[in-house]
Image (cartoon, grey):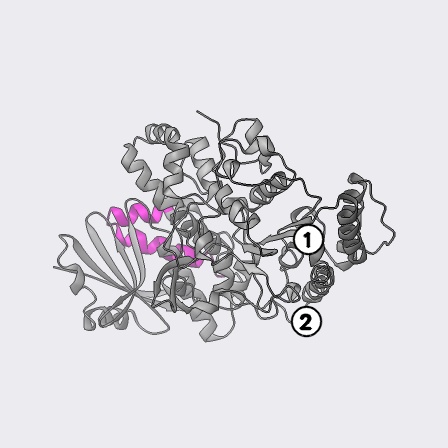
Amino acid sequence: MKDITVSKANFEEIIKDDFIYVDKTEFLYKIISSREPYFFLSRPRRFGKTLFVDTLEKFYQGKKELFEGLYIFNQDWNWEEHPIIRLDFNMIPSENREVLNKSLQKIFSKIAARYNIDLIVEEAYYMFPELIEKLYNKFNQDVVILIDEYDKPIISNLKSTLEENSANLKTIDKNQDYLKMLYDYLKPLEGYLEKVFITGVSKFSKLSIFSTLNNLIELDQNEEFAEIMGYTEKELDEYFSPYFSKLAEKNNLTISECRNKFKQMYNGFRFTEKDSRVYNPFSVGNALKNADFDNYWFESGTPTFLVELIKNKNFDLSNLENIEVGKNEIKAYDIGNIQIIPLLFQTGYLTIKEIEDQVIYKLDYPNYEVENSFNLNLAKSFSQNKITVPVVHRLKKLLINKELEKFIQQIKSIFFSLVNINIPKSLQDREAYYNSLFYLITTLLTDNNLNVYSEVLTSEGRIDSIIETDTNIYIIEFKANQDAEIALQQIKDKNYAERFKIKDKGIILIGTNFDTEKRNIKDIKIEEID
């Protein structure tokens, strides 16, 4: 049984050290055999972009022996070695334009030295075309350009852009302009180029950085490349089957139960119209290597900027489930006017769940790992770390055991602990803030013993929250600055409980009223129905 590696993104090391390599070279072959010169692919972090770029590099270095047993090995290809310029912006400092320029100067000088080429100019954006031309002339071979995480100089500066006219936005604009100058040289030098392959997390509207590359092939929503990143169910069967026995045994599950839980935790990412859902490779590797279900992908990078953006825009978090948008609304976003939904889609926190008439895209969390981790992170931020895993666990136990008085006291205690934190000043924004916080608390209760549904649509209206245990169903309506009786009466008037009466469970109605001035629950009405 081959070992799993989650830390290596070097194709040659993975092959030579006999680690599992999930064969994606069929997609590689489609790219290298295409007559098109420019390709762009965006995918969330930790999806294997760097490994794919590295595999391309080894291919264009003519290292055929590394590919034995893989799809591309037996394809009709001459395996010629090409000069390569590889830029990994994850490794390139870019705090501002000056730092970016100096960093690229060093990289271009290093590449030139490796190929024994002397560069005359010193500015990086002049060194780039000179390097391309001299590599071509020296080796009489077209040059391959590989650019990994092209957007890092932009998104790494998205830390304080919530304030208009912030210094960070100016830095971003300058970095964008600088990179545009760099890439503008590719078009007139097209005759010297074999292939240009660019990856990133984000795709900006008016992809201005590559505006001169008018024939750039965008692969991110191309159905033919739906499975270029991430693992399919079939690939799990082919490469990782022995590891599921170990995972199942450690967690006292059958293989079937184990696979179902694994799917709920880590599957669900869909990027194109093709109904193909993939697993995140980082989570798969860690879960199987450690034989433990945990939140791996999310914990590998905290989305601080995303959380701050959501808070500052007073975004209604209940709208993050079952979102409906137009197809073009998720393709890109404007860096100067960032919209939350396309940003969440491109970064992997939302995914395509369903497509209606090839026009309406329904988005939702891809899986339990992302939903639970993201909501917990948001809850901690909204509550300044007052809402934690132990707090949520106690709430779950109280609901399962139907200890409603203690559950209410615990909720009140949570809100009481938030009295001194900074919250929006306007009444409307306060209501949105507390509604989001209440939504987060109830959503976090979801696990194997509790099912939580928020903003449930019925023929009579939307139910704020439904919590279902093995024995009971709690229907909760949340109001602000009104009356708990009104909330309870709304549940009755709109017959929210009707659809659940066919289940052999107790039904408990809970009307909740929040006082935004006192910053706590003012009153609660509970009624159990037959």
Note whether residue 88 is visible. no
Q: Quadrant of residue 244?
A: top left
Badge 1: few (under 14), some or many (20 or more) residues near its Cα, within 10 Å?
A: many
Residue 35 drawn at (x, y percent): 58, 55
Q: Secondary structure at mark 1?
A: strand
Front residue of this view, candidates 24 and 442: 24
Q: Is residue 12 magenta?
A: no
Residue 492 drawn at (x, y percent): 19, 69
Q: Quadrant of residue 511?
A: bottom left
Q: Which portion, as a residue range, is magenta?
A: 393-419
Q: Secondary structure at mark 2?
A: loop
Note whether residue 457 is visible. yes
Of labels 1 and 2, the one closer to you: 1
Q: Quadrant of the N terminus?
A: top left
Q: Main secondary structure of the magenta part?
A: helix
Badge 2: few (under 14), some or many (20 or more) residues near its Cα, within 10 Å?
A: few
Q: Mark 1 belongs to which amino acid?
A: Leu
Label annotation for residue 165: 2
How far apart marks 1 and 2 lie (CA) works out to: 39 Å
Q: List the residue tagged with mark 1.
A: 193
Classify 159 as above or below 390. Answer: below
Q: Mark 2 belongs to which amino acid?
A: Asn
Residue 459 drawn at (x, y percent): 22, 71
